[in-house]
Each structure stands twice: as structure tokens, then as C-alpha cells.
Amino acid sequence: MSEVIDASHDHHDHHGPAAGLARWLFTTNHKDIGTLYLWFAFLMLLIGGTMALIIRAELFQPGLQFVAPEFFNQMTTNHGLIMVFGAIMPAFVGLANWLVPMMVGAPDMALPRMNNLSFWILPFAFGMLISTLFMEAGGPNFGWTFYAPLSTTYAPETVTFFIFGVHMMGASSIMGSINIIATILNMRAPGMTLMKMPLFVWTWLITAYLLLAVMPVLAGAVTMMLFDIHFGTSFFNAAGGGDPVMFQHIFWFFGHPEVYIMILPAFGIVSAIIPTFARKPLFGYDSMVYATASIAFLSFIVWAHHMFTVGMPLAGQLFFMYSTMLIAIPTGVKVFNWVATMWQGSMTFETPMLFAIAFVVLFTIGGFSGLMLAITPVDYQYHDTYFVVAHFHYVLVPGALFSIIAAVYYWLPKWCGRMYDEKLGKLHFWLSFIGVNVTFFPQHFSGLAGMPRRIPDYALQFADFNMISSCGAFIFGFSQLLLMYIVIKAIRSGQPATDRVWEGAHGLEWTLPSPAPYHSFTEPPKITDADAHS
Amino acid sequence: MSAQSPVIRKTALKLCLIVVGMFGFGFALVPLYDLLCDITGLGGKTGGPYAYDPAETRVDKNRLVKVNFITNTNGGMSWDFWSEKNGVRVHPGQLKEVNFYVKNTTNRRMIGQAVPSVVPTSATDYFHKTECFCFNHQLLEPGEEMEMPMRFIVDSDLPANVQSISLSYALFDVTGFASEEVLNGPSSAAQQSAGAGAD
């Protein structure tokens, strides 16, 4: 430890950032890299969001209005890929970069140069993916789940760009995860025991392990696709002795832990924000840690609930149904803990708290529709309908995305030393909250009535729900521009923030000045009970 | 910054091992999947050529099982493919022969491969074939038609609750997989042995 710190003292004559573009290209500073990740994620949110609005514009009325069905398929596919791999995941990695070292009292990430590499791979990966949309053959059009043989035998020629794009995103995530684990395990300040770590650090530790376990499997799956397409193998081709159903098994072995990768850090964020604004310590810290670990474990044994309809023996259907329902128990523990934290607290409702409370309520709705989908016999009805779309958007938009927005409002004053405009923040919250529900709630109904997902046109009876849904989507989409305005306004001309920023905030990051200095905790801090997790 | 702490390096190396291991595990899922399907019969894939010994085989005269045949061509495969009967009734243990037919309706030389699938999957391991066109590729000249016998035995240990078995064949165009030599050579090479475990 001291070795690292001494070394960095020797090589750095100055403590500020380098000037100009070189600062961002060559930076090894965790705060710079966190900032890069967050802006990149926001850019991807806007691109993926634009695709969502193209989808919703087309679905505003039945019939084909704006885009050809082929292009519609490219929009649904790229919207999913960009939001999952380009927006949500990099945003969480960016938050981890900014916060994990400050929360555990470390001077930087454990592997700063690899940190730079893992970020700078991403623009190339997504540049490659998005460039396919401008090629003659068109972009990927087989859904974000890229089931074979749709993504192999019947794929557009640009699929190879997609494959290498996924390889690069995977490499970036894996390097990011190694860095986060190495930081958490090796760089904690003396006295910061594992069970004193803030829950955001805990949830990221577990998430990073999930990433290490499943991103290589995804890399394997796309490698098999590459071989099937170009080198005549038959991993997923029944004609040569392969099996397309095996693709679904391998994909969902990655895919189910992946959905928890996108929600566990959100649990950590909400577990930091709610105690601050309820002015009470988090209820049931230990049970939160164990619940997170249980969810991570269970995520490995439930994958086939995504594919009940492929034809599975009864024993398999029962196993995957019950193990899926089991996840409701640790998740319920978390929800009740958040509610118990708020119970009889002196609550105030600043913007981060509003987003955090909306997270608890709306994520729970998404969890309940997940439980409905887990029931095998009825899943045959729900499979591949808008009910599924409603379910995973409820857990990902007012779930994962709201938690990221809450985190930005909550820690922004620490990052840039200035407060955001509270009035505008609240306006942004209410627009987002109303927009998200108007968009996705009606999709439950159209799904239950039988509207299939991934279609550019639909039967007339779904028209009203789709029109409502599209209106909500435009409200929600455009209100995210307000977020950009609020953040830029805060950075440029916000009121100076105090060091602790929030009256009820606990944790090491709040002991630093605002804005957090470029190099923090070069001397390990002393851990007191007041600084430990909130 | 080059003076990385040895502790961090050790952790990073261990984590890299997890990554390498899981990449390998992804590929190990392929044989594991085949093995699981083999043991349980879940994929509905029937086994390879069955060694039939009439002296050893007990015919269960008290039981009749309906065997249905389904033929379909996959995707762009333009051959005609049909069976002489839609179904037969057999006693478990009784050897039965059914003819299947293919016709190359195109004007080019093509290779087809039939892939079998049995439903219910609990019957997969009790459905034996002594001869089947699905063990081989079929190479057909333009307009050529071929009769393909399939001999099978339903095992007398077939679970009692199974009264009817459906055997489905999907015919694939595998011309693209064959080498130039096979495709352009003499038609004596017609019966190429099937590729990687298509049986």
C-alpha cells in the first residue's frame, strides 16, 4: 500500500490534471475516468433513446408510417444493445470509478492504466456497432438476444462487426471488474473491514464477480457464432449436428446474471440515498449484504425461465419456476429494509430521494410482473408479448436508470463542488416519473391482450394503449434533455456545495472537500463509526 | 505507477484465471449439453446404428405402439421429402421397415441431411434404428429421386405411459458444407458419412 502511494508521489510533480484533450486520452485518474464513463453512458442513453422514440413513433398508430419493417427490427435490436451495454453498464462502472476509491479510502483504482484502457475500448466498440446502421446490409436486426440461427444463418453480413463489438464490450467490462475487485479487496483504508463497507461497494464487489463469471461465456457464445458463420462449424446449426436451442441455454446462462449486473449496483445506490434523507441508519445492513449475495447465487440457476416455451420436461419447468420465485425472498428482504429505513425517519424529499423512492415502488412493480412471468403455465401466454417488454422496462428504466439518475443528483455536488437547481431537479423527476409510467404501464395490458413484441405493425385493438404509450415515451425521452441542462448548469453556475452536502450523509466521501480534490486519500483516512456505512 | 503492489498483482492474476476458466466453461457447455441430451433424451435426438440381435430381442405381442412419421424440409431446402406411410402400429421389440423418399427438384447437384427428432422425449432412448438415411448425407443429381429405407425397433422397455411416438425428420441443405471434390466428383461418392454427430 505505502509503496503505491510513495511511487505516485515520486512521479507526480503537480497534483492537478493535465491540460487539454491529452488529459482525457491518457488519464489514469479514477475521477477523470469515472467522468468519461458517465458522459459516454449519457451519450449512449440519448442515442438508444432516439431509437426508442423511432420505435414509439412507428407504433403510435397501427399500420406502417415512418420506417420499413427491416429498419424497425434494427432499431429494436440496437436500442436494446446500446441501452444494456452502452448506457446502463458503463454508467454503473463510471459511478464505481468515482465512488469506490473515495468510499473505501483508497487513493485511486488498483490498476489505473488498465482503467484507462477499459474505458477507451468502449467508443470503438460502439462506433463499430453503430456504423453498421449506415452500411448497405444494415445493422443487427435479430433482437438484442441474437438467437441463432437468426443471428447466424439468416444474419445480415454486418453481423461480424456486431460480434467483434460484443467482444470488445466484454473485454472492457472484464477489465473494469478486475479493477474494481482488486481495489475493494486490496486498497481499503486500515479499519475499513468488509462489513463496514458502504452497500454500494458491496453490491459492486458482487456485481464484478458476476461480470467475471458470465462475460467470458458471452464472449464464447459470440465466438461460436463467428465460427459458425465464417469457418463452417455447426455449434448452432442442426444440419451439421448442432442445436439452436443450445444457443439459448448459453445466452441465458450469461443473460440472467447480466440482468442482476444491471440492478445490484442500483440496490447499493438506493441503500446510500434512503438513509441520508430519512436521517436514520440503513435498516438491516447485514441482511442487505447476504440478500445481495443470495440473489447473485440464484441468478446462475434460473436461466431457463427465459425459454419455457422451447419444450422442456416437467421437472425442468418446475425447477426453474421455483428457483425463480425463490429470488423474490432476498429481493423482498431488500425492499422491506428500505421501507423500514424510512419508517419513522425525518424524511425530506430532495430530488435524489424522490428518484430513490420511485425506484423502490416501481422496481417492486417490475419484480411482481417478473413473478407472474415465472409461473410456467401462464408464461406460455405472456412469452414474447408486450407484457415481457413492460416487465423488463419497469426493472431497467425506473429501476436501474432511476438509480443512476438519483446517484448523479446525490453525488454531483461532491464531484463538481456545486449544487444543482433543486426546483428543476424536482421538475425533471415528475416529468420522468409520469412519463415512465404512461409509457410502460399500458404495455402490461396490451401484452396480456396478446400483442407480440418486436413488431412494427399491430392489430387494431391495441391502438389506444400504443398511442398512450408513445405519448409517455416522448415525455420521458425529452425530459432527459432537462437532466443534461440541469447537470451542465450545476457544473457552470451552481451554488457552492458544502463538504457534507446533505445533512444526513454518512461515509468517507463526504469527509473530503467539495469538489473532491483530484488526488484524494493519498494518506489513508482513519475510519470512525460515523464515517462507516450509513 | 509501475511499482504495482504485489498484492494487487496477485489478486488481478487470480481474477484473470477466473476469466480464462469461464471462457473455457462456455465452450465446455457444448459437450455438456450434448451429454445431458444423450443421457436424458431431452433433445429428441435418436442414437446411431443399433445392433439388432433377433435372438436376444423379446417381442411384446400384448402391446401396440403407434409410430407417426413427419417429414419437413428446412428453410430454403427445395427438395420433395415424403414417407410411404404417415404412421404404423408396431409391437415393442418388432423390427419394422418404412420407406422414405427424396427428390431433388432443382437443376443442380445438391446434398441433403435429415435430422431426426422424437416426441415424447421420454421415448427417445427407447427408439432404435438399425438403418436410417439420417446416418448419411444424400447427394442427388438434378431431378433425381431416391428411396430410402428406415428400419427401427421400439424397445420393449418403453415406458408404459407412452402409447404413441412421433418421429420427425427435418431435411437440411448441406451443399454449402461439402467440399468441391464431393460435389463435383462421381456420384459413387453419394453416400458420404454424416458430419459431426448428426445422428
Image (cartoon, coloured by chain):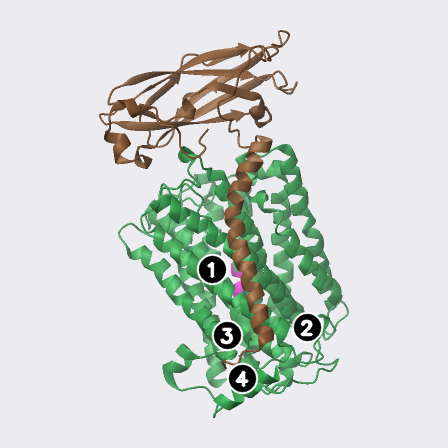
Chain colours: A green, B brown
Specify few, some or many for label 4: CA neighbours under 10 Å numbering under 14, 14-19, or 20 or more. many
Q: Which residue is mark 3?
A: A34
Q: Position of residue A24 (x, y in %)?
A: 41, 79
Badge nearest the viewer, 3 or 1: 1
**Given the image, on which type of amino acid does mark 3 rest?**
Gly
The kind of secondary structure element at disc 2 is: loop
Relative placement, left or right, of A128 versus A350 is: left
**How far is the residue under mark 3 from the one under mark 4?**
18 Å
**Residue A504 rendering spot, x and y as whole percentages:** 69, 79
Which range of residues does the magenta coloring cover? Answer: A431-435
- Residue B16 x/y as whole percent: 54, 63
Name the quadrant containing residue B41. top right
What amino acid does circle 4 point to?
Answer: Arg
Chain holding disc 1: A
| Disc 3 residue crowd, few under 14, some 14–19, many 20+, Cα 10 Å | many
Task: Please report, as a chain letter, where disc 2 is located.
Answer: A
Whether residue B38 is visible: yes
Query: Disc 2 marks which residue?
Result: A197
| Label pair 3/1, CB-CB below 8 angstroms | no
- Residue drawn at the location 45% of the way across and 86% of the way down: A17
Amino acid type of the residue tagged 1 in the rendering: Gly
Q: Which residue occupies 59% across, 69% down?
A: B11
Residue in view at x 57 percent, y 78 percent = B5
Horizontal placement of A182 versus A465: left or right?
Answer: right
Magenta: predominant secondary structure element?
Answer: helix
The mark found on residue A170 in the picture is 1
- The disc at residue A418 is 4
Residue A29 in the magenta stretch? The answer is: no
